[in-house]
């Protein structure tokens, strides 16, 4: 059995443990992720939601993505760190911010999404597959 992926916010008030391997790992260059991260992209790992354990009380912020579907970002009300996302249209997945991992070196990005909105100063691995928006589903 593989070691669970574990992590949380900066102050430790929110913690998660996730069995299994990521279904998809990406850097997203959409404007929402740029604004939330304060950089040129957000880095995420997406998992099956089954078996995900979250402790602590997250605050939630809903926003509407380009698809018209609601995505909910969970963040710590104490330290303000964004930790995870869920998607109304995909209730069976759970997405974490790569930097929230206790062992961030376990994060292995597979692709760049919303590359069309990337900035020349945001240098990402040129060998990653790039999608102008979201990958076809």
Image: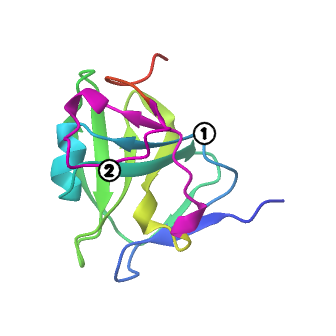
Kindly give the residue lying farthest to the top in the view shown: 136
Q: What element does badge 1 sit on?
A: loop
For the point 56% across and 66% down, which residue is it? Answer: 105
Choose top left, top right, bottom left or bottom right for residue 23. Answer: top right
Kindly give the residue lying farthest to the bottom in the view shown: 11
Kindly give the residue lying farthest to the right in the view shown: 1
Please state which of the two labelled residues, at mark 1 or mark 2, is closer to the viewer: 2
From what the image shows, is residue 85 above or below residue 4? Answer: above
* Closer to us: 136 or 72: 136
Q: Any mark on residue 33, and which?
A: none
Residue 12 visible in the picture: yes
Give the image location of residue 12, x and y in percent.
41, 81
Choose top left, top right, bottom left or bottom right for residue 8. Answer: bottom left
Give the image location of residue 50, x and y in percent.
63, 46
Magenta segment boundaries in residue numbering = 104-129
- Quadrant for the N terminus, please: bottom right
* Closer to us: 113 or 51: 113
Task: Give the residue at mark 2.
Answer: 42
* Crowdedness near tag 1: few (<14), some (14–19) or many (≥20) residues, C-alpha within 10 Å: few
User: Gap between marks 1 and 2, in whole Å?
Assistant: 17 Å
Task: Give the residue at mark 1.
Answer: 23
* Closer to us: 75 or 66: 66
């Amino acid at each position: 059995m593989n070691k669970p992926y574990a992590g949380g916010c900066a102050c430790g008030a929110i913690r998660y443990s996730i069995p299994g391997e990521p279904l998809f790992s990406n850097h997203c260059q959409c404007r929402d992720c740029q604004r939330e991260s304060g950089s040129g992209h957000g880095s995420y790992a997406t998992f099956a939601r089954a078996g995900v354990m979250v402790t602590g009380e997250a605050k939630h912020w809903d926003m509407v993505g380009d698809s018209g579907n609601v995505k909910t970002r969970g963040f710590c009300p104490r330290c303000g760190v964004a930790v995870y996302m869920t998607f109304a249209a995909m209730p069976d997945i759970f997405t974490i911010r790569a930097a929230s991992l206790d062992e961030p070196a376990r994060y292995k990005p597979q692709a760049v999404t919303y590359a069309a909105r990337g900035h020349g100063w945001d240098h990402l691995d040129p060998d990653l597959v790039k999608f102008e928006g979201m990958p076809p589903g």
